[in-house]
Amino acid sequence: MKKILLSLIFLGSSGGNLKAADASFDQLLKQISPDVKVQAPAPSLEKVSMSGIADDGRYWVTAVASDKQARTRLMEAGMDIVEIHGSKVSGLAHANTLKALSAEKSMVIESAITVEALHAALSSQKDFPTADAAYHNYAETTDLLKQMASKNSDIASLFSIGKSVEGRDIWCLRINSNAKGTAKSSKPGAFFLGNMHAREHLANEVPLLFAAWLMDHRNDADVKKYISTLDIYIVPMNNPDGVEFDIKTGKYQMYRKNMSKNSDGSRGVDLNRNYDSWWCQQGASHSTWADTYCGPRAFSEPETQAIKKFVEERPNLRTHISYHTYGGEILYPWGGSDDDVPDQKDRAAFIKLAGEMGKLTGYVARKSSDMYVATGDSCDWTYEAGKILSFTFELEGSGFYPGAAIITRTVNSNVKAAVYLLSVTDNPYK
Ligand SMILES: [Zn+2]
């Protein structure tokens, strides 16, 4: 899917030898730019209706939900809230969710359009093989990480933290001046995680290109200091199966979950409802077909189990960002409760750090549950289990498929925020 970019990368390397290829940050960004001039063709409705998305039973729904309780209830009914505009919300909901909601007098569904109509509405957006070729699929992400590790083998190493449902490795690039691979380190740790939700492709690009930026700038005084004093982990693609499913036909599937086969034959668990933090109590659904399906039990999924094991084995972790799209927000715990975190020192640090990173990105910093309450959230769990100051970034953009033009701007501002987080990882309370 990134044939243009890959062919450029391999220019000057004989025989496509990965070790000789250039994965530098500047070059990657430069190579992204030509792609944005390519205009995506409007999706063909005929073709869309033949693809998986048209017959998976979901609708693009606008509902009246004027407060947080109403929004939380919609999510419990299985609606995947994507946008909030005043008293109305929009997002994806299965036909079964609509049936359940229409039986509730208090719930007003304003419109529910078919996926064919949704695709027509999306016709101005870019499509993957041509206009969005700059985005990295799983194989390309894996190649880039391997290149970075091999070119910087004195400070970087690559290992798998576990396998996905379909057996893909979930790769982690570690940056540390002495400890390699899974060797223990007592240096304060920072953990960057991307692309938990399949369709949020920009959430892979940000941590992946941040890794490339760190490698390029490894001799800058401040970066050099972080590399020698911190233990930095970058897992850009947590849900490789879902990512590949979302793009494999060349038509986006608006797919969110992983690729688990549920007991009733339906597909997928919402990984960000599967963590053991008030698991499936509010803002999540027990219905297998729902986009907010929490799974049969907490940590039922290999992708969340891998993160659990990773975090539990590393008590040195202090700071964490989990990248999602979209909305331009920096969210801190709790997401699964209306309450503030009880530790006042942590709460002050959350507010300060989120605010500083908000200044660097232009994103709005706030408590995660200010929008709606959603339990089983990964950042609630990493904070509670590991005392890691954890932030959910909803990257900028006006949709899940904002096109390739957004990558450069988003990556550049997010590199600044990520570097800021590194600067406080030795003592986030200072
Ligand atoms: Zn997400």
Image: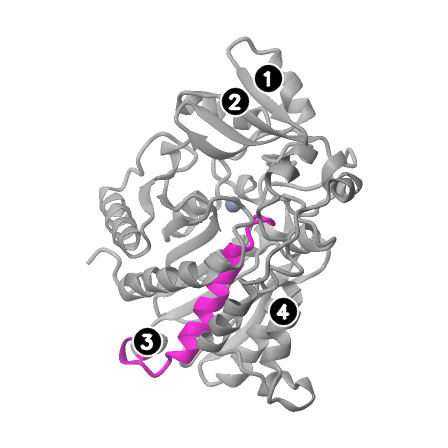
Q: Rounded to the nearest whole Å, what is the CA distance between mark 2 and mark 4?
A: 39 Å
Q: Rounded to the nearest whole Å, what is the CA distance between mark 4 and mark 1?
A: 42 Å
Q: With respect to residue 142, does 305 lie above or below?
A: above
Q: Rounded to the nearest whole Å, what is the CA distance between mark 3 and mark 4?
A: 26 Å
Residue visible at 34% across and 78% down in the picture: 228
Q: Earlier in the sequence, mark 4 or mark 1?
A: 1
Q: Are marks 1 and 2 in contact (CB under 8 Å)?
A: yes
Q: Is mark 2 within 8 Å of ligand 1?
A: no
Mark nearer the viewer, 2 or 4: 2
Residue visible at 36% across and 33% down in the picture: 370
- Residue under numbered circle 4: 140
Residue 335 lies in magenta, yes or no? no
- Residue under numbered circle 1: 101
Q: Is residue 113 left or right of residue 411?
A: right
- Residue under numbered circle 2: 63
Q: Secondary structure at mark 3?
A: helix
Q: Position of residue 334 (x, y in %)?
A: 38, 38
Mark nearer the viewer, 1 or 3: 1
Q: Is residue 48 left or right of residue 356?
A: right
